[in-house]
Amino acid sequence: DTGVSQDPRHKITKRGQNVTFRCDPISEHNRLYWYRQTLGQGPEFLTYFQNEAQLEKSRLLSDRFSAERPKGSFSTLEIQRTEQGDSAMYLCASSLAFGQAAQPQHFGDGTRLSIL
Amino acid sequence: AQSVAQPEDQVNVAEGNPLTVKCTYSVSGNPYLFWYVQYPNRGLQFLLKYITGDNLVKGSYGFEAEFNKSQTSFHLKKPSALVSDSALYFCAVRPYSGNTPLVFGKGTRLSVIA
């Protein structure tokens, strides 16, 4: 079990640029989640996949955000035309789908995005 | 819609003393409840969960939590705090049924003083 891996750990970019983050889940986990965490808040759900299917998207996920998991393994989260308010920690988590509601999610160390 | 309240932003405790981090929840139906810990610049680490059965749940690093259905609470406890327990603690809930995502509280910062 190598854990959930996220890349990059930090990203600094200018407002208006596009950014893409990558998440590699625990290998046998078929569920993958994306969260956003801002200072002083708990993680807020963005979207999740079961295998390659994106099953739910939060209202927080504006049209500028897109997530993919093309082969049911790693996932990418892209933010287009970044805005100041996008500055946050973006967390990825994975879990087994079996007994899904009871399964704990295992988190990566996140990508911290800073918009200049 | 489900929600979680962690009424204390900060909890301070002396090393060796017992600690409690409070959590109350609101959910339709029976809840699944979780506690996570977050160290600086790291992701969340799973500590323990309540699914069903015994109201007292034991987890990692000597932590335990008590589920109280009538008070809709799930407080995290440890009999003897360590300085290394200092971190940010999050309570999370999801309903027993359905595919709804986890909802997290705002977190409680625990400081254990030597």
Image (cartoon, rainbow, N blue to C red):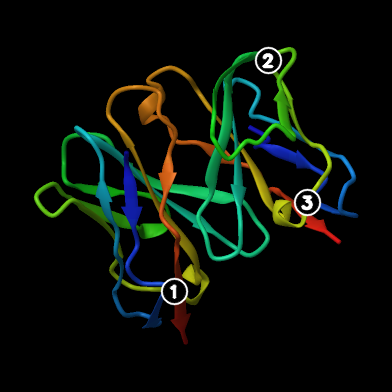
Image quarter of the C terminus of chain A? bottom right
Residue A46, compared with residue A72, is above or below; it is below
Q: Amino acid at mark 2?
A: Gly
Mark 1 or mark 3, which is nearer to you?
A: 3
Label 3 sits on a secondary structure element that is: loop
Mark 2 or mark 3, which is nearer to you?
A: 3
Q: Is residue A101 left or right of residue A6?
A: left
Residue denoted by label 2: A72
Going 73% across and 24% down the picture, which residue do you hit? A74
Dot 1, how many residues are within 10 Å of its Cα: few (below 14), some (14-19), or many (20+)?
Answer: some
Residue denoted by label 1: B82
Q: Nearer the viewer, residue A34 or B84?
A: A34
Q: Is residue B49 left or right of residue A96?
A: left
Alpha carbon separation for disc pair 1 and 2: 41 Å
Q: Position of residue A113 (x, y in %)?
A: 77, 53
Picture disc at residue A83: 3
Q: Amino acid at mark 1?
A: Leu
Going 13% across and 55% down the picture, which residue do you hit? B71
Q: Chain of mark 3?
A: A
Q: Earlier in the sequence, mark 2 or mark 3?
A: 2
